[in-house]
Amino acid sequence: MDATILLVEDDPSIREVTAIGLRQAGFTVVTANDGRDGLDRFLAGAFDLVLLDIMLPRMDGLEVAREIRRTSTVPIVMLTARADTIDVVVGLEAGADDYVRKPFEVPELVARVRAAVRRMGRHPDDETAHLRLGPLVIDTAGRTVTRDGLEIALTRTEFDLLVELVRHAGQVLPRDTLLDRIWGYDYLGDSRLVDVAVGRLRAKVEPDPAAPELILTVRGAGYKAARQGAQ
Amino acid sequence: MIAFGGVRARLTASLVALVAVTAIVLGLSASWFVDLRLHDQTLQDAAAQARFDLSVVVPGRQLPDAPTLDDIDRSALAETFRQRGVETLVDLGPRGEFRSTSRLEGLLDRLPPDMPDRIDRGELAFAWVDVTGTPSLVIGGRPAGVDAAFFFVRDVSGLRAAVDQLRVALAAGGLILVLLSLVVARRIARGILAPVEEAGQVAERIERGDLSARVPVTTRDEFGAWAERFNAMTAALSDTIRRLEAAQQQNRRFVADVSHELRTPLTALVAEASIVAEHLEELPPESRRAAELLVGDVRRLRALVEELMELSRFDADAEEVEAEPVDLVRLVRAVIGARLPIARFVPPAPTVIADTDPRRLERILGNFLDNARDHAGGVDVDVTLEIGEEDLVIAVADRGPGVPPDRLDRIFERFARLDPSRDRGTGGSGLGLAIAAEHAALLGGYLQAIDRDGGGLRLELVLPSDVTGSLRDGDGSVIRAPDDGTPPSTTRERPS
């Protein structure tokens, strides 16, 4: 796979072995050992994915993610020491698309990186160029969402999630189905990713995120997009 | 509130009894003394009068030496004496007996026998007698130069009435005193017992965990001394408890710090070993076995550190339940699929919704399955989900060697390795079930281990069944009464 990855990790052993694993899997890897260095390298180069440790000297990973999100929709995968909900939420709030918990086995990390990169390179769908959900108009070819002619800025993950829900409007999609289709998890994953991502998506597209009308929660089952004309 | 009724009642009763006895003794002696004094005074007055009458009044009437009844009658002595409230009886010996009133008839027979003798010797004599129902004082004597014995009878019923009145007054006063003492005694008893009651409240606060509670030392009496001792004891106890808590805290922090510090090198190790594991075939045979062992040991170390960190989060009370409606059938199937796909599971209904934390359930069930895999070879494992009236049970039963009944309770303890000879390579860290127990407690339930008939171990997660049935409408599912008679709200079936 011909993709370039920026790896920002301060521990030399972890950094080196992770780089070895990714290179063996066919990626080109650029490494940085602190947050400031990582951001500088990101701004100087072109990357298909950023692997970001949270606890970094000089500038922490969350800050780096926020800075990257100012200018780019590149997939960001966080490396977190803890998997508490608060860490997951904070990471995703900062703009990350996924996270990998430490310690990790390299094949597991490679699989996550592959899934994210593949999603990035997914070809635009030509058959249905425009989808609608209430006041939203979704252009799957141009990967844009507009409401009343104004574009809403979504991350790739949020966009993919919205498209998946709208393609199956009126149908309940369980969390693990969404995890599989959007994040590429093929095993029992962390459904909090879905909850957090849906929350962020609602904040951007719902007229009132506290009383969602477009993306509905089905308690005990999952999420569904409201059927067209049946709001 | 602690009741002090017994002691207070006894104290009150004692005080009242003391007052009552004192009042009775004082009343009786007072009435006795007054009675005595009044009689004495009356007697003195009467005697003086009699003496005067016998020596002055009677001789002044010029009676003959041996007067007859007529002489006495004519002398009008009786009228004179009656004016002073005194009736008169004159004993004229063989000449008869003069009586100023018929009431005095037979009086002489009722006088003490020694009275006539003393009168004959020229003395005054007296007696307290009843004259036709009237208490009376009789004084007898002989006037100078007249052969007759005069008996003056004085009505003393007024005296008796006065004494009776006094007794009534004293009794009434005594009763009031006793009633008053009852009120006062209750107050006093309460006052005496107040420190005890207060100490009771303080002890209650200490019992509830407020080790800073102290009994106020307000007096320098026995209670004060006792309160000081009590406070000293509480201070010593709370000091010990604080030291133990600090030591335990330190211990836990140490475990948390150690596991945390281990995490960075462990992350490197795990990543490195995972790469080595992918290239085992390329290694020369002599180092391949060592590399295999290395990979396995790193996995074990990782499990141990992660479980220690998990436990230290419980110890730090850093865990919170994130409850949501969960389809237990789906969850159990998913965990079995990930951890032990060959385990059997027959769901009681197509869908069972519970309001609980799915990640903790996954953890508990996963650890149950790991235990069955590690200790029973993972074969012949049955997973069941039972919905009862009061609880909901998720169980994993194996046909392994089981656990001796007397050690069943201990399998949820940390590092509970029941068989010392057991090869360490077969099992997990020894923390899995302890962690499961912590998760279960957080969900409001508990774990139990049961020795199976026919061999094997059954691990149960018991949750209160009120976690089920809180699902709101909205997913188009229909409520269906399950076959086992549980309330219909606990299971749901999604229409196909």
Image: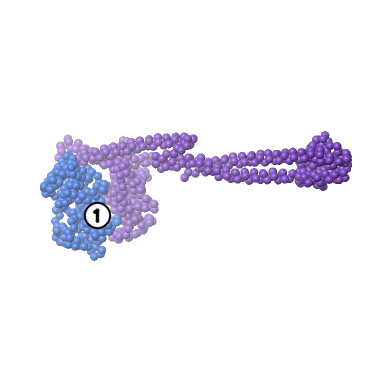
Chain colours: A blue, B purple
Q: Is residue B167 visible?
A: yes
Q: Please state if B3 lies on the left or on the right of B434 as rendered.
A: right
Residue drawn at x 42%, y 42% is B205
Q: Residue under circle 1?
A: A199
Residue drawn at x 16%, y 42% is A34
Residue B451 in picture, x, y percent from top left: 37, 43
Q: Is residue B296 visible?
A: no
Residue B369 in picture, x, y percent from top left: 29, 46
**Image quarter of residue A166:** bottom left
Residue nearer the viewer, B183 or B195? B183
Q: Please state if B121 lies on the left or on the right of B338 as rendered.
A: right
**Image quarter of residue B290:** top left
Residue drawn at x 29%, y 59% is B475
Q: Vertically, is B279 above or below B330?
A: above
Residue A103 in picture, x, y percent from top left: 22, 43
Instruction: List the single residue furthest toward the bottom.
Output: A229
Q: Please state if B485 lies on the left or on the right of B119 as rendered.
A: left
